[in-house]
Image (tube, rainbow, N blue to C red):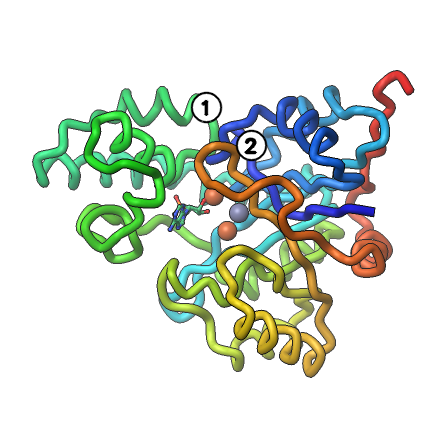
Amino acid sequence: MRIDLHCHSTASDGTDTPAELMRNAAAAGLDVVALTDHDTTRGYAEAIAALPAGLTLVPGAELSCRVDGVSMHMLAYLFDPEEPALLAERELVRDDRVPRAKGMVAKLNELGVPVTWEQVERIAAGGSVGRPHVASALVELGVVETVSDAFTEEWLADGGRAYVAKHETDPFEAIRLVKTAGGVCVFAHPAAAKRGRTVPESAIAEMAAAGLDGIEVDHMDHDAEARERLRGLAKDLGLLVTGSSDYHGSRKTVALGAYTTDPEVYGEITRRATGAFPVPGAGGA
Ligand code: AMP
Ligand code: FE
Ligand code: FE
Ligand code: ZN
């Protein structure tokens, strides 16, 4: 069983449509794929409609959070997408992404970069708008060579010259909301230091006590030492350990299934969830 629990589509900052993502996941030999777009469930319907036989979809989302001034991402799986409180919080974060992106465009204009909101809006194409879309605009304009090159102090990195913060949920509130909606919470790439400051272990322990289910350990942004440390932490705190590609299509170089989750952990996630079920592909098989 090959299980990839963290992937993005054009519903947020990935470049595969949800349908393309499902086809590519099957082609990559995956048995289970989670759709975890930033702060949205908008891709679900298209993904389900396109699901090939032999592939199971885990509906999810990656929630933008912040604790003690540190931004972090919380993966939420198998929650009820219509549960009103969590739905309202997703909308709040997603809606704030628009003025925030316009703010980054304004800062870039002040820095002499002729990027426009219309350009960013076209690139985002209705998806949850984020820095990678602004980064793609900078690539189009020839300001940087790759999306990753835009995530520096000079441009869009946390605290960078053109960075603007957005509304982000307190992770303890996110855990409460996801649990109320019957979902399971996994702290995404907790040791991804190159993205900025990381959350201290003491705070992860508090989250574990507040109902956090697991931490993502096998991720491209974690080196061998970070993975060892996180595995130890998970053991101490009784947390599940996941692995995933955090696939973003052509906006990142990582391939689908580059990192995977143990089938036993996946089984435990599905047993804990009460808000939704994994969707097996019918696909005319
Ligand atoms: P936002 O949610 O708009 O603040 O943007 C955060 C997203 O930017 C992350 O989810 C990643 O998709 C992307 N990102 C963050 N750091 C990098 C990086 N160094 N290179 C490429 N993409 C990145
Ligand atoms: Fe992303
Ligand atoms: Fe993330
Ligand atoms: Zn992600």
Circle 1 or circle 2, nearest the eye: 2
Q: Quadrant of residue 280?
A: top right
Front in this rendered view, residue 230 or 278: 230
Q: Residue at x 9, y 38 (%)?
A: 110
Amino acid type assigned to the residue bearing label 1 in the image: Gly
- Give the structural element (helix, strand or loop) at label 2: loop
Dot label at residue 276: none
Front in this rendered view, residue 208 or 161: 161
Give the position of the C terminus as an image quadrant. Answer: top right
Amino acid type assigned to the residue bearing label 2 in the image: Ser
Extreme residue in the top direction: 284
* Position of 156 relative to 229 (above/below): above
Q: Position of residue 264 (x, y in %)?
A: 84, 60
| Marks 1 & 2, CB-CB < 8 Å contact | no
Q: Tell me: 189 left or right of 284.
A: left
**First of labels 1, 2 by sequence position:** 2
Q: Position of residue 23 (x, y in %)?
A: 69, 25
Q: Position of residue 166 (x, y in %)?
A: 35, 48
Q: Position of residue 152 (x, y in %)?
A: 26, 52
Q: Is residue 92 visible?
A: no
Q: CA distance from mark 1 to mark 2?
A: 12 Å
Using a 10 Å C-alpha cutoff, classify the residue at mark 2 as few (fewer than 14 neighbours), some (14 to 19) or many (20 or more): many
Q: Is residue 26 visible?
A: yes
Task: Provide the residue designation for mark 1.
Answer: 126
Q: Quadrant of residue 109?
A: top left
Task: Provide the residue designation for mark 2.
Answer: 9
